[in-house]
Image (cartoon, rainbow, N blue to C red):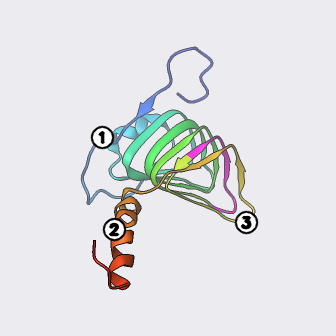
Amino acid sequence: MLHSNDNAPKTQFTPSTLNPAAPVKTVTSPIEQATIGRTLYIDGKIEGTLTFKDHRVTVGRNGVVQANIAAREVVIMGKVTGNVECSDRVDIRSEGTLNGDVVSQRISVEDGAMLRGSVQLTPSEHKHEKSSDTPKSFAAAAGKSN
């Protein structure tokens, strides 16, 4: 809902198609959500909840988002007010602003970017698998066996 003053629930966005060949779609209003494929590029104002767990969400320089975002990857070049949860990484570019908390495996904040909130980094599953094999590697390198 854009510029809404009523108390109606906010719109929740989810990917509508899983076509890997789908082009990047620029969204300027929530009504256009139905045509989005794998990547969401926001260059306008959006309120609500953005849920794209297996996809990338990019907030362009003109993007103003008042929403919690859940995605694989989030790139912020505009303004975001809300919490961001990513399974891979958050990238806040030099002209970007995020007012909210971040939960992600990786985060990148360029010089000049604004981040107001807490950051919680979660370990990746791949790193856990490697760390469990590390003691065996050290033992093998030392010529010892378990």
Residue position marked by numbered label 3 in the rendering: 111
- Confirm or deny contact between disc 2 and disc 3 (CB under 8 A): no
- Confirm or deny contact between disc 3 and disc 1 (CB under 8 A): no
- Mark 1 burial class by Cα count in 10 Å: few <14, some 14-19, many 20+: few
What residue is drawn where x is 57% and y is 14%? 7
Q: Earlier in the sequence, mark 3 or mark 1?
A: 1
Left or right, 102 with respect to 130, comes to right
Q: How far apart are marks 1 and 2 (CA)?
A: 40 Å
- As drawn, the label of residue 104 is none
Which image quarter: residue 67?
A: top right
Residue position marked by numbered label 2 in the rendering: 133
Q: How many labels does the image show?
A: 3
Quadrant into which the C terminus falls: bottom left
Residue position marked by numbered label 1 in the rendering: 16
Is label 3 in a helix, a strand or a loop? Answer: loop
Residue range of the region highlighted in magenta in the rendering? 93-102
Q: Relative to 19, does residue 69 appear above or below in the rendering?
A: above
- Is residue 97 one of those drawn in magenta? yes
Left or right, 77 with respect to 122, comes to right
Q: Which of marks 2 and 3 is in front?
A: 2
What residue is drawn where x is 64% and y is 40%? 100
Q: How far apart are marks 3 and 1 (CA)?
A: 35 Å
Is label 1 in a helix, a strand or a loop? Answer: loop
Q: Which amino acid does label 3 sit on?
A: Asp
Q: Camera-side residue: 67 or 129?
A: 129
